[in-house]
Amino acid sequence: MKQTTQFSTISRRHALAMLGAAGAVVLAGVPAYADGAAVAAKIKGLTGGKSVGEGAIELDLPEIAENGNAVKVAFSIDSPMTADNYVKAVHVMADGNPTPEVASFNFTPAMGACSASTRMRLAKTQNIIVLAEMNDGSFKQAQATVKVTIGGCGG
Amino acid sequence: MAKIKPRVKVPKKAAAGEIVEIKALISHPMHTGRAKDKKGNKIPRKIINKFVASFDGQDVFTANFEPAVSANPYIAFPFKANKSGAFTFTWVEDGGAEFTASKKMTVA
Amino acid sequence: MRLAVTITMALSLVAGAAFAKTPYHDGTAEVIKPTDKNHPLGEIVSGYDFRKAMIRDVQDDDFANPAMLVADHGEELWDTVDGSAGKSLSQVFEGCAEVPLDVVGSVYPRYHNAAGKVISLEQVINMCRETAMGAKPYKWESRDMLGITAYIRMQSRGSRVNVAVDGQASAAFERGKELYYTRVGQLDMSCAHCHEDNYGNYIRADMLSQGNINGFPLYRLKWNGVGSTHRRFRGCMKNIRATPLPYGHEDYVALELYVAWRGNGLKVETPAYRN
């Protein structure tokens, strides 16, 4: 009985393995926008529908992640970080995970510079979106794609 | 359950006006609430959802973590050294448990 | 039979050009020439050099490397008094290990005079706990055992792996070699099929290394934690649908000795970080 179960598992696994072997390159090249709408909704919620500028955010993400369990995500934003001109918050989102939120950070002028680095789980190849909120209420955004060869969900 | 233990890196000494890098790591499985154990039962969500760094009692940096943050969460951030003082780092787990670590920094 | 055929197809390996860019492929890896004329390979390369920057950068930064959380735990245990003799491992370990502390990590598994056979570092530690400390042995894959083995091997970090396989170690070495080349499991594969014949190539989305163990115990992303060489052996055996042996099995110690010898000359990297 146990043997039968094992065999059925293998058939499914080896089918996947074939897919993986043959299609690794092709699959990795397809951008995943599955949750693009969720990210858009999230950004709209955070910005209250205000327009979002580009630039001034430098992202440090691997182009290819060998494993999605711990992918470095780091950013730095050029800002004087003075009491009247500083980055208030930064939101990191991913459009191919079960939920779009990854982490958010609250900054203060005491830091003297605006950057942070952490590690995140990515279920598959997807876009990482970083949204920064300035103390004057304006927003900036940057985005990059990370190709994930092994997803961060036990794959 | 793995023992929950923080690890932080703060320079012991810094020059006035220097921007130093602070690093913090804590051992935690960051259960997302989506995985199952070997028996097929769902492992309930339990993550470190918040990290707060304060300097001499004043909050200077906060990170809010979602389940997408990796196991053993790692965070690095800058801080401008203006005066000598002590950092306190607090990690908050779902359910409210807190873990803390402190480090002193001398500014010359 | 049809199953066997499809499985073979499933495991057909993809050449490693598309996603290469590892130090092994771009020529920046440290490549060791084996000094033993019986070595089956012309080059010895650490698993580190088969990984991309995302993985290597973490190992290169002791603070970012989560394996250090476990090694720190080991450092605490090292100086903690435990057992009826009122001693800590730091007070008795060198006597138990039969070699200096900073050498242990590069020469184990080793023929141990008191034990009368080749034993692994985990076994030396437990022997020491039971006989010299009067303390209970650690479970093989416990946080305590992983911590203490990581901490002890770290004392040899940077020195070259140099396990002895001659003299009284030769029987275990020969057994390990035999196991390395023996086909097992439903997929009917040996260690050599992947780690000797196909290192540097992809198996599904994973790039195969030479299977060197110079970084163990190590943090593995797949595990979200630290594990031992024997855990890795068990994982390999499950992958080829074989029945894994228990932790600490005599055959695994023999295989560990043989695999360590294949990596003689590599730097000890414990605690390493891998995918």
Image: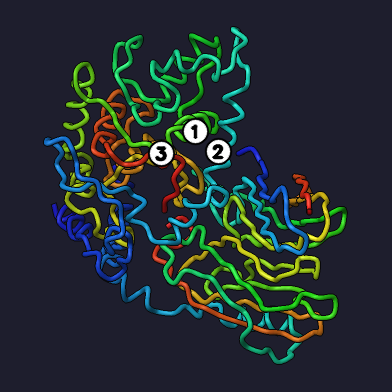
Mark sitting earlier along the chain (3/1): 1
Q: Check chain identity for marks 2 and 3: say if they share one.
A: yes
Distance in Å between CA atoms under marks 3 and 1: 9 Å
Q: Check chain identity for marks 3 and 1: say if they share one.
A: yes
Mark sitting earlier along the chain (1/2): 2
Which residue is identified by label 1?
A: C146
Colour scheme of the picture:
rainbow
Q: Percent from the top left, x then y, of residue C243?
A: 30, 36
Image vertical order of residue C210 relative to residue A89, above or below = above
Which residue is identified by label 2?
A: C70
Looking at the rendered structure, the secondary structure element under dot 3 is loop
Question: What chain does mark 3 sit on?
Answer: C
The amino acid on which the numbered mark 2 sits, given as a three-letter code, is: Val
Distance in Å between CA atoms under marks 1 and 2: 7 Å
Q: Percent from the top left, x then y, of residue C229?
A: 37, 36
Image vertical order of residue C101 relative to residue A147, above or below = above
Question: What chain does mark 2 sit on?
Answer: C
Mark sitting earlier along the chain (2/3): 2
Q: Are marks 3 and 1 in contact (CB under 8 Å)?
A: no
